[in-house]
Image (spheres, rainbow, N blue to C red):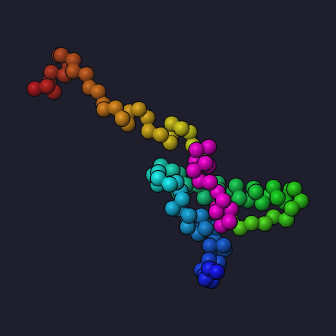
Amino acid sequence: MPEFNPFLEFIYDEPKAAYFSRADQFGGQNNYRPQQNYYQNQFSNIYNRYLGDLGMQARSGIQPQGEFNDFLGTFDFNKHYRENVQYETRQPGLSAFVPRMQWQVPGINDQRLR
């Protein structure tokens, strides 16, 4: 049986603490930096999704239940990132792999060639 941790109450009382305590999940398994940066600014969107889930429970006649920390435990950060960020933003373009090309035109570039 796990030991009692008196500090866990803080995570349940402070939603931002619960969210940012999971920062190790923001980048996925490979710690993908753009994905980590994306989630640094997504607290309000994720929290609103949680509140929306509670609202849907209430509208369907069910007493809203569930802590934000528990919601985060089942939240798929990778899937959410793939669904909400355009592919072009997630992946470097071809220019990241191709060196910059410079044309050498006689008469125009002569001064730089000397």
Q: Name the image quarter holding the C terminus.
A: top left
- In percent of the image, x 41 and y 32: which residue is there? 94
Left or right, 68 with reference to 93: right
Q: Is residue 70 magenta?
A: yes
- The foreground one among 42 and 25 is 25
58 sits left or right of 94 in the view? right
**What residue do we see at 80% from left, 58% from top?**
55
Q: Is residue 91 magenta?
A: no
Furthest-right residue in view?
Answer: 61
Question: Percent x, y for residue 77?
Answer: 59, 53
Q: Is residue 76 above or below residue 92?
A: below
Which image quadrant for residue 69?
A: bottom right
Q: Position of residue 102 (x, y in %)?
A: 26, 26
Farthest front residue in view: 1
Q: Position of residue 4 (x, y in %)?
A: 63, 83
- Dominant secondary structure of the magenta stretch? helix
Please give the name of the residue rendered at 66% of the width and 73% of the height, measured from the top-left corner.
12
The image quarter in which residue 22 lies? bottom right
* Up-down relation of residue 12 to residue 112 (above or below): below
When the figure is inspected, residue 79 is found, relative to residue 105, above or below; the finding is below
Magenta residues (range)? 69-83
Name above or below for residue 19 compared with residue 36.
below
Q: Residue at x 64, y 61 (%)?
A: 72
- The quarter of the picture where residue 100 lies is top left
Q: Which quadrant of the rendered structure holds the N terminus?
A: bottom right
Q: Residue furthest left?
A: 114
Q: Is residue 62 left or right of residue 5?
A: right
**59 sits to left or right of 12:** right
